[in-house]
Image (cartoon, rainbow, N blue to C red):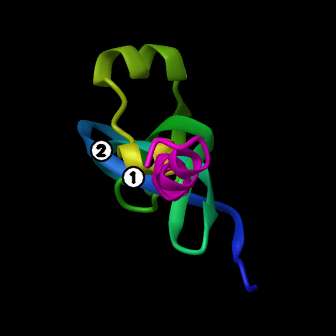
Amino acid sequence: MWVVFGIKDKIIYLFELDIQECPYCGNMDNTLLSVRFSYAYVWVLPLFLTARQYFITCSVCKQHIITLNNKIIDKKLKSPIPWIYKFGWVIPVGLIFSCLIPTVLDSIGML
Ligand SMILES: [Zn+2]
């Protein structure tokens, strides 16, 4: 059986912040609040998060200007990462259990 699994990185740009000079490209432009996270996956299904970090990012060159404290941002934003990247493991576990329940009920004489 051919199973592809591993860890991928993804960046989500959440929203624009104040105008600030970028120390990398020198542009005066809006900065972006962004979150970069890593998640484990099987085939195309995300399973769970392995890491996350919030940044203030330059909107021109996309360099991370400032690294932010995860706990403070999580409290303010109530987890902006889509649930599938955190709890995707529920889907295969649910499918396995839904296949096992009839077998278990049959074996104990409930069906
Ligand atoms: Zn820049």
SS assignment at label 2? strand
The location of residue 61, given as percent across then percent down, is 45, 62
Task: Kindly give the residue lying farthest to the right in the view shown.
Answer: 1
Residue nearest the viewer, comparing 35 with 2: 2
User: Amino acid type of disc 2?
Assistant: Leu
Q: For the N terminus, which image quadrant?
A: bottom right
Query: Which residue has dot 2 on it?
Result: 14
* Beta carbon of the mark 1 residue lies under 8 A of ligand 1: no
Q: Main secondary structure of the magenta part?
A: helix
Residue 110 is covered by the magenta coloring: yes
Question: Looking at the image, is 15 positioned above or below residue 26?
Answer: above
User: Amino acid type of disc 1?
Assistant: Ile
The location of residue 84, given as percent across then percent down, is 41, 50
At 39% across and 42% down in the image, what residue appears? 81
| Residue 23 appears in view | no
Q: Quadrant of residue 17?
A: top left
**Residue segment shown in magenta:** 89-111
- Residue 12: numbered disc: 1
Task: Kindly give the residue lying farthest to the front in the view shown.
Answer: 109
Mark 1 packing: few (<14 Cα in 10 Å), some, or many (20+)?
some
Q: Quadrant of ligand 1?
A: bottom left
